[in-house]
Image (tube, rainbow, N blue to C red):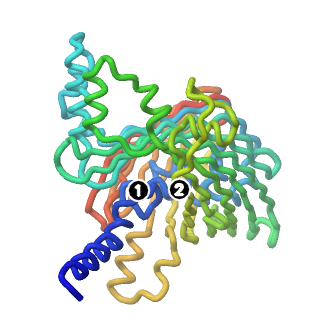
């Protein structure tokens, strides 16, 4: 083989090996989009303020979304609407001059505020802002119905430099139908709650956009953000229909043991479109812009299969003096299957990594005080019920790294709801 042929073979081998790396993929195989593969979960402010515990905690309208076996005995609950806003990196934001820049009348300070905000985002995965809207939540006679929408701004940062920040805007709409019933075993001593729910979720997110692009658009008055996001930015969208099955074994003195199986039939069927306008043309035959008449382009189709999860929980809740005081203690083991096969120190580490501990004290059916411990991170919460107006606040920490302590991010959630809590 002469030198030219050898050179050609080497070039072909290199190209064959490099081409897959250069191909754009919008699924979890691309580290930037890993978080978009997570199954949809609305922001449960009660559980988050209790360290992520509360599998067997009844008494609020959205408890069946955590465990459908909570439907029996929950009574009639009707919420319409409720809004939850969650901000991340709260301490960093308060310590930065961002708020001073935002309140300034100088237009240049608005750009400085955006720059300071981007500085609060750390390397690796994270979240920036999440808004949940519960359009309708209904519990009645063992039936549960919830209609939710969520906006989530996801971040991924490749380095320490501000311009390495990538942002992904994601929106999800979900409708969940649940059914539960109670089986008496020994009157006043033992009974069993069984429940199941099915959720139809539709998720869509835009291709990641760099921080430098955002700042450039803010500086360039001639730029048209609507055109960029409508016609020039790929959109990835798809549906899933996960099923959840739960059980509560209720004993005397307010004790109950819970078991919940999640992510059954939870495959996400996703399609990447060349733009939001192409998505509208493909699915509705209607253009969102004046660019009508072109053929919509599909860039990629893929499936995401979330891992099956089995959670266990132990709950104690008892009312004293009627409605004077109602304390609740919860201990949950999330994804208990991960403990199988482990021994010694590995089992101990895995157990505490999966364990969530929470406590709640309800006073006069008006005030809720909550505390939790999750993987060593503390959380606190406060709930206030004023007739048909309800406010809940939670401050907690989430781990975004692969190992405990790699990347903790603090978050503040505020929920305002009407009618039932």
Give neighbour class at mark 1: few <14, some 14-19, many 20+ (Cα, 10 Å): few
Query: Residue at position x 62%, y 36% from top?
Result: 280
From the viewer's perspective, is residue 398 above or below residue 213? below
The reply to whether discs 1 and 2 touch (Cβ–Cβ < 8 Å) is yes
Q: Answer left or right for 248 relative to 237.
A: right
Viewer-proximal residue, 313 or 284? 284
- Which sits earlier in the primary sequence, circle 1 or circle 2? 1
Residue 358 on image: x %, y %: 46, 57
The quarter of the image holding the N terminus is bottom left
For the residue pair 290 and 242, the one nearer the viewer reads as 290
Residue at position x 47%, y 43% from top?
Answer: 234
Q: Where residue 255 sits: x, y (%)?
A: 62, 65
Marking on residue 306 = none
Residue 388, by quadrant, is top right
Packing grade of label 2 (10 A; few <14, some 14-19, many >=20) is some
Q: Quadrant of the C terminus?
A: top right
Relative placement, left or right, of 54 versus 418 is left
Relative to 266, 180 lies left or right = right
x 64%, y 37%: residue: 281
Residue 299 appearing in the image: yes
Instruction: State the CA–CA distance, disc 1 to disc 2.
Output: 9 Å
Q: Which residue is mark 2?
A: 300
Q: Is residue 384 something one can see in this rendering?
A: no
Q: Element under label 1?
A: loop
Name the side, left or right, on which 91 lies relative to 305.
left
Q: Position of residue 274 (x, y in %)?
A: 51, 44
Where residue 87 sits, quadrant-wise, is top left
Residue occupied by mark 1: 24
Residue 83 vertical placement versus 241 (above, below): above
């Amino acid at each position: 083989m002469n030198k030219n042929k050898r050179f050609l073979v080497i070039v072909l081998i290199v190209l064959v090996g490099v081409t897959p790396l250069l191909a754009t993929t919008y699924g979890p195989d691309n580290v930037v989009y890993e978080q978009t593969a997570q199954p949809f979960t609305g922001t449960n402010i009660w559980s988050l303020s209790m360290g992520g515990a509360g599998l067997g905690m009844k008494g609020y309208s959205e408890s069946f979304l955590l465990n459908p076996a909570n439907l029996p005995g929950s009574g009639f609950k009707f919420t319409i609407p409720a809004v939850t806003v969650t901000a991340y990196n709260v301490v960093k934001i308060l310590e930065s001059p961002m708020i001073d820049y935002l309140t300034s009348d100088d237009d240049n300070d608005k750009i400085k505020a955006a720059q300071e905000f981007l500085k609060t985002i750390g390397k690796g995965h994270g979240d920036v802002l999440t808004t949940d809207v519960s359009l309708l939540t209904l519990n009645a006679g063992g039936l549960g119905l919830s209609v939710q929408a969520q906006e989530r701004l996801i971040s991924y940062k490749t380095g320490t430099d501000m311009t390495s920040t990538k942002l992904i805007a994601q929106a999800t709409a979900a409708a969940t139908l649940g059914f539960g019933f109670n089986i008496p075993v020994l009157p006043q001593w033992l009974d069993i709650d069984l429940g199941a729910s099915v959720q139809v979720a539709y998720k869509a997110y835009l291709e990641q956009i760099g921080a430098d692009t955002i700042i450039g658009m803010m500086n360039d008055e001639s730029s048209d953000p609507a055109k960029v996001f409508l016609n020039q930015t790929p959109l990835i969208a798809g549906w899933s229909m996960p099923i959840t099955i739960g059980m509560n074994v209720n004993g005397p003195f307010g004790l109950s043991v819970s078991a919940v199986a999640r992510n059954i039939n939870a495959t996400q069927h996703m399609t990447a479109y060349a733009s939001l306008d192409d998505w509208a043309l493909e699915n509705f035959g209607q253009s969102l812009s004046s660019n009508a008449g072109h053929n919509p382009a599909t860039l990629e189709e893929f499936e995401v299969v979330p891992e099956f999860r089995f959670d266990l929980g132990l709950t104690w809740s008892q009312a004293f003096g009627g409605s004077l005081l109602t304390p609740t203690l919860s201990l949950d083991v999330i994804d208990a299957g991960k403990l199988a096969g482990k021994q010694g120190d590995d089992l101990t580490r895995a157990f505490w990594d999966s364990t969530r501990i929470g406590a709640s004290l309800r006073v006069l059916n008006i005030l809720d005080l909550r505390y939790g411990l999750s993987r060593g991170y503390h959380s606190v919460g406060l709930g206030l019920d004023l007739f048909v107006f309800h406010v809940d606040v939670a401050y907690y920490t989430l781990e975004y790294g692969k190992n405990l302590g790699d990347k903790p991010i603090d978050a503040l959630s505020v929920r305002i709801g009407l009618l039932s809590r």
